[in-house]
Amino acid sequence: MRKPPAKPAYFNFRRLRGGVLAVGDLGGWALLTPAEFKAFAAGRLKPGRALEKLEGAGLIASRLDFDSLSAAWRDSNEYLERGPGLHILVLTQNCNHGCLYCQAGSGRGAGMSAATARRAVDLAFSSPVTGLTLEFQGGEPLLNWPALKEAALYARKKSAKTGKELALALVSNFSLMDKAKAAFILENDISVCTSLDGPADLHNANRPFSGGNSHALAEKWIKFFQERRGVQPPGGPSALLTVTRASLPRAREIVDEYARLKLPYVFLRPLTPMGQAPKRWGEIGYSPEEFLAFYRAALDRVLELNRRGTPIKEKTAFLLVKKILGTQDNKYVDLRCPCGAGLGQLAYDVDGGVYTCDEGRMLARDGDFSFRLGGVRDSYAKLISSAPVRACALASSLDLQPACARCAYKAWCGVCPAYNAAAQGGFWGDMPANARCRVLLGVFDHIFASLTDKDNLKIFEGWLEN
Ligand code: SF4
Ligand code: SF4
């Protein structure tokens, strides 16, 4: 029997250096030569390797395998029925550092009370998820040690009672860590993450600390936890990098510093226009293109180190490659559709205010309460069905965003209503003029350019195996 003509299924495309990328709605993709692409788009592709590739990617309308496509869609969107799994407790706004880009809204005031912390834990456990993560943040959360202890112990008890899996996580600059606190953290299986902006001079210039050497303290406690828990996740400590203007010429040194400290991931994150950053943009900010030049140099250094046997990954590349080459993993709440605001995470402020996410909470520091859902005394049902959760779900649905709906990277991307509100004054944003979108486009372009090199492809595949 003659096969029906090779009419294309719905697809988006992007011209890249290595050819033309065609991508279906569910992330099936094929990189074609310009001639193959022309024939494909016109429905005139002759039998051969390109057609087989396109069939396998679900890009030929008459040859779609609906069973496997719908199963893949269900798997990748399963989180929508589960409720928020990440719960961020902001234990204090106080901090002993004066980071140039501070986004946590540091200030002076009382910390979260033990009663509020317990109520936040109760709310977290009301989410219908089977497993949840409680993350302790600030300011510097170690400045409110009593609330941290109370919340951790109370959550462990609730976990034992309800049977829900619980992961506890601490994000700290480590400057107030001591043996007693570290012992509690180890005993209660709390994972730790710190900030590390690169070599000591760069880190300390970005993160002034009048009480001592911030970099030395971060290094000391990274090594302490590595000795006790190993270097690999989920037990080993991790670190977050914020890129400032001073970081731009130092991509290789920054990656090398992460490799020196045996950190398994370096996460190349651009500044966001929240907290202190917009006030000092002239001093520490940069354009998306400047960030992308830095990103490309840093990712190339990561790949070079991998070729020499150093097992380090770049986190954004890892998350995207996982989606592109593997299964649609939607655990990372900022790159999914709809985004994780309320649907994947909730943030609890010092005063008991509940927000869609930590970024939404940060905006309230500057007087924008659009992302506030209510307070810890409200019911879970009321909070989760509140207007900000619904507005974020709509504004981060990529098919409703005109530029995203026709973007080749839609299947793996995500927009951020909190970023849009901060940068462009509304949940929806305007993607053609949106700096976050320009960065993502450039990162995707570079990842696809890297994927076309056989050695790099092998490295990326190795990342997914480990
Ligand atoms: S945010 Fe930008 S890169 Fe992402 S899908 Fe939308 S248009 Fe594409
Ligand atoms: S609004 Fe932005 S920061 Fe908040 S969950 Fe959505 S993507 Fe993440």
Image (cartoon, rainbow, N blue to C red):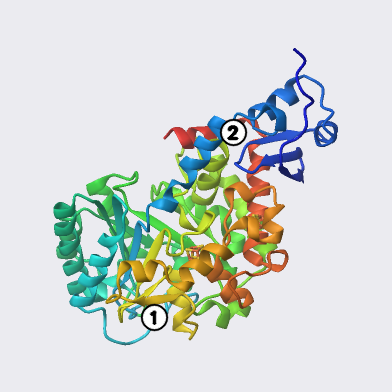
Q: Distance of mark 1 from mark 2, alpha carbons?
A: 42 Å
Q: Nearer the viewer, residue 139 or 306?
A: 139
Residue on which disc 1 sits? 106
Q: Pinpoint residue 338: horizontal percent, then vertical percent.
A: 53, 57
Q: Is residue 228 above or below residue 182?
A: above
Circle count: 2
Q: Is residue 14 above or below residue 29?
A: below
Q: Pinpoint residue 421: horizontal percent, then vertical percent.
A: 57, 75
What is the crowding at mark 2: few (fewer than 14 residues within 10 Å), some, or many (at least 20)?
some
- In the rendered view, does 215 fall on the left or right side of 154? right
| Marking on residue 457 | 2
| Marking on residue 63 | none
Q: Nearer the viewer, residue 142 or 115?
A: 115
Q: Earlier in the sequence, mark 1 or mark 2?
A: 1
User: What kind of element bears circle 2?
Assistant: helix
Q: Nearer the viewer, residue 399 or 359?
A: 399
- In the rendered view, does 162 fall on the left or right side of 246? left
Residue type for callout 2: Leu
Q: Is residue 310 above or below residue 90?
A: above
User: What kind of element bears circle 1?
Assistant: loop
Q: Pinpoint residue 51: horizontal percent, then vertical percent.
A: 74, 25
Q: Quadrant of the C terminus?
A: top left
Q: Pinpoint residue 151: horizontal percent, then vertical percent.
A: 20, 67
